[in-house]
Each structure stands twice: as structure tokens, then as C-alpha cells.
């Protein structure tokens, strides 16, 4: 081997160069340097989960859910949510912040749901499919049948006129839930008050009789 200037390399230089550039001895093993994993635990306890939100903060979140359908879905998430949403105080506050949706018009005999292009049309027709506004689940009437008087908070007020003993035609009232098909008759006018209700000028029929719901006080 030669230097760049043409001189010949001595054997000492050649052996030293081979020692520096040669391969490692076959019996020599290279030690791998293992770095510690910064993400591996050192035996300490895992981080604790954050504490649950107190009920009054959860209520502040739920009361701001604009859609009643979304509120129902949220209440189904866990028992604590359902308990908060079902409370009477929460429902009163929710109704004060979110006016009821206009789903249709209730006439004396039927419910007319909101039609297409109305923002609540889909919800209105879902109500029609789930509820029974035909009143077919009520006992039959001998005279005029049941008619709608008022509606509030998912309940409807019904009225019918039936003949009492003595030939008096007096109204009977009932509160029904079209979704559950449940119905609760209201107490009738007691016999002791029939004369004051009819009066001498009205004969056997009651005069103008208007029934309606009164909002519950907070």
C-alpha cells in the first residue's frame, strides 16, 4: 500500500489500519444500551379519576338542553340524570326556560298535527303515531260522546253530557293521557248543587259550562 505522495506504507501502519477498520471479533458481543421508558410506571398508584359533578351543576347543564327529545335521551344515560330530570322543580324550571313546542291544533273532536315545512312537523307526526287521539279506549257514551276542552302538559281535558236521575243533563269531566291511554274521571256535580247549577230558567239542561286546566303554581 502507498501513501498519497507515493511512499510505501510500513507493515506497522498497515496492521494498525486494519485493526482500526476491520470487523469486530466474532466472539465479541456489542452491549445494547437500554434507555428507561419515561411512560412506564415506577410502581406508584395510577392517577385518580376526577370527582363527579355535584347535582346542582348537572342540573344547570340539563336545564339548558333545548330539545325535549334530547333531554329524554340524556335522562336515560344514568339513574342520577333521570332522578334530576323527573323532579317537579326541574320540570317547572325547564318549562319556564323552554316554551312548549307547537305540535298542532286540538279541536273539539280531533288533533290536527303540524304539517310539512313546519319546524315541528316530524315531532308532531311522531306524536300522532305514538298517541291515541281517537278516544277509542274510553267507555262509550249514550249521548254526545266525549269532546276535547283543553290541553296542558301532555294531558287533555274531556267533557261529555249524560242524563242523571230526574232527567237532568249535566256535564262529566275526565283527564286523559293520549300516550298512555290512561283516563281519570273527575268528581261529578253533587246532587245538592244541581239546583243551583241548573236554575229555573234553564230547565233540565245546564247553562254555558266551560272547563279548562289551571296552571299549577310554583
Image: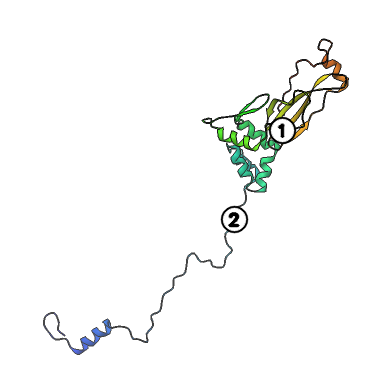
| Outermost residue toward the top in this view | 201
Q: Residues within 10 Å of mark 2 (few under 14, many from 20)?
A: few
| Outermost residue toward the left in this view | 6
Does residue 206 sit above or below 178 in this rendering?
Answer: above
Does residue 172 sit above or below 40 in this rendering?
Answer: above
Observer-nearest of 125 and 53: 125
Residue 15 horizontal side relative to residue 8, left or right: right
| Residue at 59% from the left image edge and 53% from the top image edge | 50
Mark 2 vs mark 1, foreground winner is: 1
Residue 105 in sight here = yes
| Among the 4 quarters of the image, the one containing residue 93 | top right
State the image coordinates of residue 51 (x, y, percent, origin top left).
62, 52
Observer-nearest of 205 and 37: 205
Residue 123: assigned label: none
| Outermost residue toward the bottom in this view | 11
State the image coordinates of residue 147 (x, y, percent, origin top left).
71, 25
| Among the 4 quarters of the image, the one containing residue 66 | top right
| Residue at 59% from the left image edge and 55% from the top image edge | 49
Does residue 5 sit above or below 196 in this rendering?
Answer: below
- Quarter in which the N terminus is drawn: bottom left
Q: Look at the numbered disc 1 and give the secondary structure of its residue.
A: loop
Q: Residues within 10 Å of mark 1 (few under 14, many from 20)?
A: few
Observer-nearest of 174 and 38: 174
Q: Look at the numbered disc 2 and give the secondary structure of its residue.
A: loop
- Quarter in which the C terminus is drawn: top right
Q: What residue sits right under mark 1 in the picture?
A: 136
Residue 72 horizontal side relative to residue 31, left or right: right
Circle nearer the N terminus (2, 1)? 2
Q: What residue sits right under mark 2 in the picture?
A: 49
Q: Colour scheme used in the picture?
A: rainbow
| Residue at 24% from the left image edge and 87% from the top image edge | 15
Residue 217 in sight here = no
Amino acid at each position: 500500500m502507498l501513501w498519497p505522495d507515493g511512499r510505501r506504507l510500513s507493515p506497522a501502519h498497515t496492521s494498525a489500519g486494519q485493526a482500526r477498520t476491520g470487523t469486530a471479533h466474532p466472539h465479541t458481543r456489542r452491549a445494547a444500551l437500554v434507555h428507561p421508558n419515561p411512560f412506564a410506571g415506577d410502581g406508584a398508584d395510577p392517577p385518580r379519576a376526577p370527582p363527579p359533578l355535584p347535582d346542582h351543576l348537572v342540573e344547570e347543564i340539563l336545564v339548558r338542553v333545548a330539545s325535549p327529545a334530547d333531554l329524554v335521551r340524556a335522562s336515560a344515560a344514568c339513574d342520577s340524570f333521570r332522578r334530576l330530570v323527573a323532579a317537579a322543580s326541574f320540570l317547572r324550571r325547564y318549562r319556564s326556560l323552554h316554551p312548549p313546542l307547537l305540535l298542532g291544533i286540538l279541536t273539539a273532536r280531533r288533533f290536527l298535527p303540524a304539517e310539512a315545512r313546519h319546524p315541528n312537523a316530524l315531532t308532531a307526526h311522531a306524536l300522532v303515531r305514538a298517541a291515541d287521539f281517537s278516544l277509542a279506549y274510553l267507555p262509550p257514551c249514550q249521548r254526545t260522546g266525549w269532546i276535547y276542552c283543553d290541553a296542558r302538559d301532555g294531558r287533555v281535558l274531556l267533557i261529555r253530557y249524560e242524563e242523571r236521575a230526574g232527567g237532568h243533563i249535566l256535564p262529566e269531566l275526565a283527564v286523559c293521557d293520549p300516550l298512555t291511554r290512561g283516563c281519570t274521571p273527575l268528581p261529578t256535580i253533587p246532587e245538592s248543587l244541581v239546583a243551583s247549577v241548573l236554575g229555573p230558567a234553564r230547565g233540565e239542561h245546564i247553562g254555558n259550562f266551560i272547563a279548562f286546566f289551571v296552571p299549577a303554581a310554583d
